[in-house]
Amino acid sequence: EVQLVESGGGLVQPGGSLRLSCAASGFTFSSYWMHWVRQAPGKGLVWVSRINSDGSSTSYADSVKGRFTISRDNAKNTLYLQMNSLRAEDTAVYYCARARRATGLYYFDYWGQGTLVTVSS
Amino acid sequence: DIQMTQSPSTLSASVGDRVTITCRASQSISSWLAWYQQKPGKAPKLLIYKASSLESGVPSRFSGSGSGTEFTLTISSLQPDDFATYYCQQYNSLWTFGQGTKVEIK
């Protein structure tokens, strides 16, 4: 059974840093692209970042570029999101998601339960 | 950036109703569109990919159609478990979600 379990969320002051983790199990982690998606309280889903299967390629939403860094450790089956210079508008539930490609491009087939990040003084 | 617009934002319906949600892309995305269902406090769940392909395990009352810039998600006979928020997502160029459609009990 595919499982994605996020951790590392919490309360942080504006300008602070936080590192999120996503522990994967039930599939060959090193074969899949992975993503982070966030959802502000009461709002919709917003894509944040993605990383390819071996970690050699990444991309980011403009809103987090230069502040967030996605990475992975395939030996530990774990995805990370390092978040620096946090702002109030980064407050959200952060989900990790597995990407699947079926005859084309990548969409998200499994999601974790999410971890809440609150940026406030 | 590709923008995705869903309509309506909220939909009131009864069990057994046929429900249709529309999603429009700001430019052509071919068939690179997915639909997700999200219940309060839960992670999104994949329903449809490549505009009309039903994800394994998803009930056949869900169906998707469209290509280019206009897409629809149809629930043929609404069931109690279907009251939720639905999101479309394009994956033609990066990844963008619609703002969501909440299906509530009439």
Image: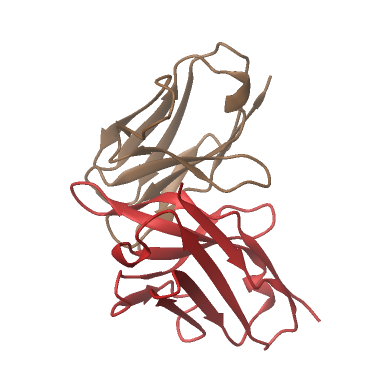
Q: Relative to B40, does residue A117 appear above or below in the rendering?
A: below
> Color of chain B here?
brown
Q: Can residue B12 be seen in this view?
A: no
The quadrant where residue B72 appears: top left
Residue B104 coordinates in the image, percent (x, y)? 65, 28
Judge left or right: residue B12 versus residue B52: right
Direction top: furthest residue: B16
Residue A99 coordinates in the image, percent (x, y)? 36, 56
Depth check, front residue: A62 or B37: B37
Looking at the rendered structure, the number of numbered marks drawn on it comes to 0
Q: Which colour scheme is used?
A: by chain
Q: Which residue is drawn at 58% across and 74% down?
A: A20
The quadrant where residue B106 appears: top right
Residue B76 coordinates in the image, percent (x, y)? 45, 16
Chain colored red? A
Depth check, front residue: A25 or A72: A25
Q: Is residue A117 visible?
A: yes
Q: Residue at x 33, y 64 (%)?
A: A33
Judge left or right: residue B67 versus residue A36: left
Q: Quadrant of the N terminus of chain B?
A: bottom left
Q: Residue at x 29, y 77 (%)?
A: A57
Depth check, front residue: B40 or A42: B40
Q: Residue at x 37, y 63 (%)?
A: A29
Residue B49 coordinates in the image, percent (x, y)? 33, 40
Direction right: furthest residue: A121
Q: Relative to A94, does residue A86 appear above or below in the rendering?
A: below
Depth check, front residue: B48 or B10: B48
